[in-house]
Amino acid sequence: MRSTPLFSGVIYILLGCLFTFIAIQNIQREETWGFFTYFLIIIATFDLGTGLRMVGQHFKLKNKMKK
């Protein structure tokens, strides 16, 4: 089964939000920015960027198919 770029993009965005939430919880619990917090923020950044790129790709393909 092939997934559409829109579905994959939404999944990546949700994962990015989840990793951001976990990083915020980690900062509040430990009250410091450790390696694990930076790692979570980097993963969240990649996930959000990929998700936004895939959603944009979906709409580009949709507009191309219309024409």
Image (tube, rainbow, N blue to C red):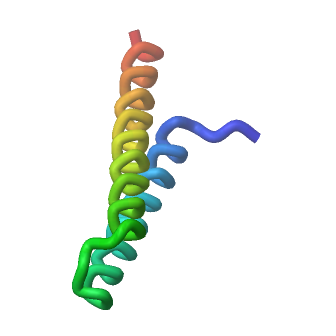
Nearer to the camera, 42 or 56: 42
Q: What residue is shown at x 40% (from left), y 63% (from top)? A: 40
The residue positioned farthest toward the bottom in the image shown? 29
Image x and y of residue 62, in percent: 43, 24
Q: Is residue 25 above or below residue 46?
A: below
Image x and y of residue 4, in percent: 57, 37
Q: Is residue 64 left or right of residue 8?
A: left
Image x and y of residue 23, in percent: 34, 72
Q: What residue is shown at x 63% (from left), y 40% (from top)? A: 3
Q: Is residue 33 left or right of residue 49?
A: left
Q: What residue is shown at x 34% (from left), y 50% (from top)? A: 45
Q: Quadrant of the C terminus?
A: top left
Nearer to the camera, 1 or 43: 43
Image x and y of residue 60, in percent: 37, 22
Rendering quarter of residue 66 = top left
Q: Is residue 61 above or below residue 30?
A: above
| Number of numbered discs on residues | 0
Q: What residue is shown at x 33% (from left), y 62% (from top)? A: 38
Nearer to the camera, 39 or 3: 39
Q: Is residue 51 above or below residue 21?
A: above
Q: Quadrant of the N terminus?
A: top right
The residue positioned farthest toward the right in the image shown? 1
